Every structure is written in structure tokens, then in C-alpha cells.
Image (cartoon, grey):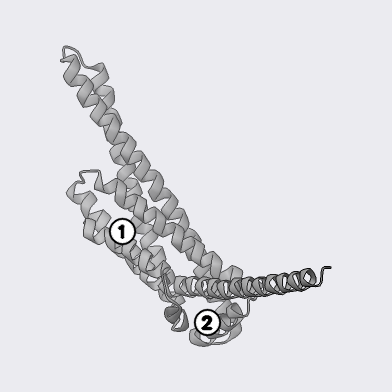
């Protein structure tokens, strides 16, 4: 399962490190298909949250029974109680992470629905609409920049939560049912991550392109400053040679 879970993390790293070439080869997002997959992934996450909440409840009952038990070895009871409460803490953290992830997926679904509406209103195909938006984005149009950055923020945050989920689950011993649920959830999150990679490539590529331009501008400023300093030093040397 760890290999499956690691795929989402790897996809995040590769995508966020997108090159300028990837930025130039930006593909079209299938908004309708992506929206449906986000909804499906959200349902899988919700199922996992339900399972985790039930397990926390069961562990809490076990902890309460231990506290009410009589004639048990104190050291053994303390060790078992600490183990149970430790598991409760881990499952609560996992449930909290999954709840945050579910919220992000809802935001992602709303973002995709908004994009679908914009495409429908424009009367253009997905390819034409995204091509137009890419051109505007390159021209620093504020509305398009905000739109694409919103989608990028949602997806990168979901990927961060996916890594946190992976770390937590690697510390737990999952039942067969939990294992199957976790693998199914990861499968759908992997699909969503793959489909959103084009959007992240667009924004990551744009950021890299801007950074390159800024680097060139900074170097030009340094060259101009060096030339000005050289000119001033030359003037000062000439004045000194004339005794001024």
C-alpha cells in the first residue's frame, strides 16, 4: 500500500518541479471528467473518515472498560491503556487530515464547476477556452491569474494532506477493510492529481518563467551599477590627476 500511496507524493514532486518545456506543452483539462473524479474521490475520503471515526469510538470504549476493570496487573493495564490511547490519538489525527482533505476536494469540485460554467458561457470548446486563458495568463490578466492560482492552491494543499495521510497510515496496522478503503481512496486521489497536473504545470512553469526574467533583470541592474561605479571611479581619478 505504501508504494501506491507514494505515487501521489511522487506526482506532486514531479509536477511542482515542472520545467519551462512542460509549461510550453500545457494540455487541456477535461473539466467534466475531472469534476466527476473529484466527487468520487470525495466519497472515498468520506468513507475513510467514517471508518476512522468508528475505530476511535471502539478504542475509546476499550479504554473505558480497562479503567473500570478490577484485579488486573497495574503495569500490564497501564501498558495496554497507553497503547490504546496512542492509537486513538493517531486515528484522530488521521480523521482530522481526511476531513481537511475532503474540504479541499469540495473546493476543487466547486472550482471545476465554475470553470465548466465559464466554458459553457463562452460557447467555445475546452481546447479553445484553455488556449485563450493561457494567452491571457501569460499576459498577466488578473482575473485569469486568480482563477488558475485558486485551482493550483487547492490541488497543492490536497497533495500536502495526502503526504500527511501517508505518514500517519504508515504508523498504523490497518485491517483488511481499512487497507482496501485506503487503496481505493489513493487510487481516486491519484487520478485527480494526474488530471490536475496540467494546471499545476501551467502555474509552476509561469513562476519559473517569471523567476528567469527576474534573474535576467537583476543581472542587468548589477551590470549597470558596475558600469556607473567604473565611470565614477574614472572621473575621480581624472580629477585627482588635475589636482582638483
The residue nearer to you, when weighing 137 against 52, is: 137
Tell me the quadrant of the picture where the N terminus can be found.
bottom left
The answer to whether residue 10 is above or below residue 238 is above
Local packing at callout 1 (Cα closer than 10 Å; few below 14, some 14-19, many 20+) is many
- Lateral position of residue 55 relative to residue 200, left or right: left
Instruction: Tell me where residue 158 sits by quadrant.
Output: bottom left
Residue 99 horizontal/vertical position (percent): 42, 49
- Lateral position of residue 198 relative to residue 55, left or right: right
Residue 83 horizontal/vertical position (percent): 24, 30
Seen from this angle, which residue lies furthest top? Answer: 71
Secondary element under disc 1, as helix, strand or loop, is helix
Q: Residue 14 carries which label?
A: none
> Residue, x 25% and y 58% (percent of image)?
183
Q: Which residue carries the number 1 mark? A: 185
Q: Is residue 120 visible?
A: no
Residue 178 horizontal/vertical position (percent): 23, 49
- Gap in angstroms between the C-alphas marked 2 and 1: 29 Å
> Residue, x 19% and y 15% (percent of image)?
74
Q: How many labels does the image show?
A: 2
Instruction: Tell me where residue 56 sits by quadrant.
Output: top left
The answer to whether residue 69 is above or below residue 244 is above
Local packing at callout 2 (Cα closer than 10 Å; few below 14, some 14-19, many 20+) is some
The residue nearer to you, when weighing 174 against 230, is: 230
Sequence-wise, which precedes: disc 2 or disc 1? 2
> Residue, x 26% and y 54% (percent of image)?
181
Tell me the quadrant of the picture where the C terminus can be found.
bottom right
Q: Which residue carries the number 2 mark? A: 130
Report the mark closest to the observer, 2 or 1. Answer: 2
- Lateral position of residue 105 relative to residue 44, left or right: right
Secondary element under disc 2, as helix, strand or loop, is helix
Q: Can residue 106 be seen in this view?
A: yes
Amino acid at each position: 500500500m505504501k508504494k501506491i500511496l507514494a505515487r501521489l507524493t511522487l506526482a506532486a514532486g514531479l509536477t511542482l518541479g515542472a520545467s519551462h518545456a512542460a509549461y510550453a506543452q500545457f494540455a487541456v483539462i477535461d473539466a467534466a471528467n475531472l469534476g466527476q473524479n473529484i466527487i468520487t474521490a470525495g466519497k472515498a475520503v468520506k468513507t475513510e473518515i467514517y471508518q476512522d471515526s468508528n475505530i476511535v469510538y471502539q478504542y475509546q470504549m476499550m479504554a473505558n472498560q480497562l479503567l473500570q476493570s478490577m484485579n488486573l496487573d497495574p503495569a500490564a493495564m497501564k501498558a495496554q491503556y497507553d497503547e490504546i490511547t496512542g492509537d486513538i490519538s493517531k486515528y484522530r489525527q488521521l480523521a482530522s487530515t481526511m476531513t481537511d482533505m475532503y474540504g479541499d476536494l469540495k473546493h476543487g469540485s466547486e472550482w471545476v464547476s465554475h470553470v465548466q460554467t465559464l466554458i459553457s458561457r463562452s460557447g467555445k470548446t475546452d481546447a479553445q477556452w484553455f488556449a485563450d486563458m493561457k494567452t491571457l495568463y501569460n499576459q498577466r490578466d488578473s482575473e485569469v491569474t486568480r482563477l488558475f492560482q485558486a485551482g493550483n492552491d487547492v490541488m497543492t494543499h490536497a497533495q500536502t494532506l495526502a503526504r500527511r495521510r501517508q505518514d500517519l497510515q504508515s504508523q498504523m496496522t490497518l485491517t483488511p477493510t481499512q487497507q482496501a478503503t485506503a487503496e481505493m481512496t489513493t487510487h481516486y486521489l491519484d487520478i485527480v492529481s494526474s488530471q490536475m497536473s496540467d494546471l499545476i504545470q501551467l502555474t509552476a512553469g509561469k513562476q519559473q518563467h517569471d523567476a528567469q526574467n527576474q534573474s535576467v533583470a537583476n543581472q542587468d541592474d548589477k551590470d549597470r551599477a558596475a558600469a556607473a561605479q567604473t565611470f565614477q571611479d574614472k572621473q575621480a581619478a581624472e580629477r585627482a590627476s588635475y589636482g582638483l
